Image (cartoon, helix red, strand yellow):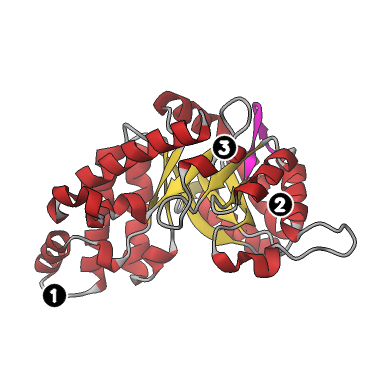
Amino acid sequence: MISILIEKIKKTNAPICVGLDPMLDYLPSHLLNKAIEEEGEVNLKAVANAVLDYNKAIIDATCDLIPSVKPQIAMYEQFGIPGLKAFKKTVAYAQKKGLVVIGDIKRGDIGSTSAAYATGHIGKITVNGTTLSTFNEDIVTVNPYLGTDGVKPFIDTCNEFNKGIFVLVKTSNKSSGEFQDKVLTETGKPLYETVGAMVNEWAEMSMDGEYSNVGAVVGATYPEMGEVLRKIMPKSYILVPGYGAQGGKGSDLKPFFNADGLGAIVNSSRGIIAAYKQEKYAKYGEKNFAEAAREAVIAMQKDIIEGAGL
């Protein structure tokens, strides 16, 4: 799967992932009001329908510029079963438009539970001889806290169905260091380096050309750590959150890329999907939110290429 993502990155010259994280206050009022009117009342189905229309408009406006999108499942779960249906429809619509879909699910458990998560999101299940897909993302995020027992079922599913995973290594949030930066007594190195070394081992289990289907999540807000982890995980693609609204910028991103100009894909969520709320894109107005998102992608591409020296 990583080879497919790389091909699309090269084609668009945009190592960009648009995070489809639709908070309720991001939804333009005309979309929400239309959905409520069609339902005849305010309910979760109306909200989910508005979310889907919102996502489709953003995908339509940006799909020729980008290689991938990343819907965060929690943003859909908050709207219950209708929200999960919108998640599944968003995945299918993005794939129809030629995009690689990274399901931001951060799952991690052991044994049959981990295998069930993998099956539910990137695998298939066979019932009475009929093979069925569920959410069917291309790549998902995985929490490695339970060790190899929690990650191996995902790797096995990647190998069976040509899928991928991004393992949480050093996340972009401010409190990540409470655990991830703790120095281990036996190695004298922080925990995130140990996890990175494990990712490098897991990467060998699912190679797809020069890079592995086993990638890592490392926040743009920690470029010095990104530089260290880039060397520890040379064959793993790095999904880089924290760009834009969280403070990361193009000039912070160079350490995340390899000498070949590949090796990283940068995520921006509200900086793109809610761009119409920013002063610099205010001219588009709420009704033209998708056009604002497109302009934000173009600006992000320029910032990354210039800032990271790609």
**Which amino acid, mark 3?**
Lys
| Closer to the camera in the image, 68 or 232 | 232
Amino acid type for the residue under numbered disc 1: Glu
Q: Which residue is mark 2?
A: 152
Relative to residue 225, is residue 38 drawn left or right?
left
* Nearer to us in this view, 116 or 150: 150
Q: State the CA–CA distance, disc 2 to disc 1.
A: 46 Å
Magenta span: 206-215
Can residue 213 be seen at all in this image of the molecule?
A: yes
* Residue that badge 1 annotates: 41
Q: Nearer the viewer, mark 1 or mark 3?
A: 3
Q: Find residue 36 and report its horizontal and vertical position in percent.
A: 14, 68
Q: Residue at x 32, y 60 (%)?
A: 22
For badge 2, the amino acid type reads Lys
The crowding category of the residue bearing disc 1, from other C-alpha atoms within 10 Å (few below 14, some 14 to 19, many at least 20), is few
List x then y, in percent, for residue 142.
60, 56
In which quadrant is the N terminus drawn?
top right
Magenta-colored segment: predominant secondary structure: strand
Q: Is residue 156 magenta?
A: no
Earlier in the chain: of badge 3 and badge 2, it is 2
Mark positioned earlier in the residue sequence (2 or 1): 1
Residue identified by numbered label 3: 254
Q: Give percent across and percent down for residue 306.
A: 45, 32
